[in-house]
């Protein structure tokens, strides 16, 4: 993607995938606002020239509106929103807690809905929204019920919003990653073959394509990006 000064807001931007997308967008010439629940990026995470907005609960509508408005102002407008904020818990239904379902709904789905609602006042014809679903939500396995239920919601939300916005020429799409090659995932699954996992940069490349003018005819798509898993 040629950034051409596209103005992009990224949620969950202090994490591994969010930082990779921010770095790729900046390298392509875009202007980036990075939003996260954490107060600051962890040591070693370089967000370059991105505007940083930390300590934000994007599930809270008032906070989301305030920060999206501030981000749009800092960028001089808004062309795209990338909803990456998310969380995972492995927990069986038998031994799990209802609070886990509430938590994963709030972080994975509600943040995407609320951030998108806050961004709509700034988006225009040709704008883009990209969400992060999960390939495992197509067919859930044991222990991932709460996570895949929330990510299934992201998928349906993506399709519905795409229909709502198509007459405004705003596209809405979602990626469905398999296991992303991140330090936490390597720690949780030390015996796995990491080479098979999808890399954050590979996901960033697909996201940047969806933000580009070349992807203007794609909306409501749920795109598997699974590496060799």
Image (tube, rainbow, N blue to C red):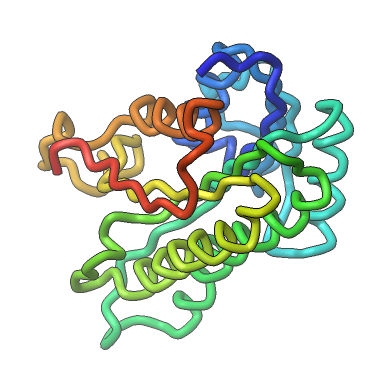
Looking at the image, which is closer to me, 16 or 67?
67
The image quadrant that residue 54 belongs to is: top right
List x then y, in percent, for residue 25: 56, 21
Q: Is 31 situated left or right of 205 in this image?
A: right
The quarter of the image holding the C terminus is top left
The residue lying furthest to the bottom in this view is 94
Q: Is residue 112 left or right of residue 187?
A: right
- Is residue 16 at least partly visible in the picture? no
Q: Residue at x 66, y 49 (%)?
A: 37
Q: Is residue 63 above or below residue 193?
A: below
Q: Is residue 16 above or below residue 48?
A: below
- Front-lying residue, 123 or 169: 169
Query: Where does the image place residue 180, in percent across and percent down from the top left?
Result: 31, 40
- For the point 26% across and 78% down, the residue is 92
| Residue at image coords 34%, 28% | 202
Please provide percent x and percent y for residue 129.
59, 45
The total of numbered circles placed on residues is 0
Q: Look at the picture and state if 4 lies above or below 81.
A: above
- The quarter of the displayed image where residue 190 is located: top left
- Percent from the top left, x then y, of residue 1? 50, 18
Residue 84 visible at all: yes
Of residues 33 and 42, the one nearer the viewer is: 33
Asked if 34 appears above or below 137 in the picture, the reply is above
Q: Residue at x 77, y 55 (%)?
A: 118
Residue at the far front: name it. 167
């Amino acid at each position: 993607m040629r950034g051409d000064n596209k103005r992009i807001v990224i949620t969950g931007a202090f994490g591994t995938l969010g930082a990779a997308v921010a770095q790729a967008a900046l390298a392509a010439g875009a202007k980036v606002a990075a939003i996260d629940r954490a107060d600051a990026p962890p040591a070693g995470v370089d967000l370059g020239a991105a505007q940083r907005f930390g300590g934000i609960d994007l599930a809270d509508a008032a906070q989301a509106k305030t920060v999206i408005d501030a981000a749009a102002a800092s960028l001089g407008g808004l062309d795209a929103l990338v909803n990456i904020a998310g969380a995972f818990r492995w927990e069986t239904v038998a031994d799990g807690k209802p609070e886990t379902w509430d938590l994963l709904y709030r972080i994975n789905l509600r943040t995407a809905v609320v951030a998108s609602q806050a961004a709509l006042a700034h988006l225009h014809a040709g704008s883009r929204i990209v969400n992060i679903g999960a390939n495992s939500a197509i067919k859930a396995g044991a222990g991932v019920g709460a996570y895949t239920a929330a990510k299934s919601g992201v998928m349906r939300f993506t399709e519905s919003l795409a229909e709502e916005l198509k007459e405004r020429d705003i596209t809405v799409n979602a990626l469905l990653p398999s296991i992303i090659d991140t330090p936490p995932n390597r720690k949780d699954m030390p015996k796995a073959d990491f080479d098979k996992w999808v890399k954050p940069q590979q996901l960033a490349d697909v996201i940047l394509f969806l933000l580009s003018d070349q992807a203007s005819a794609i909306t409501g798509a749920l795109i598997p990006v699974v590496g060799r898993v």
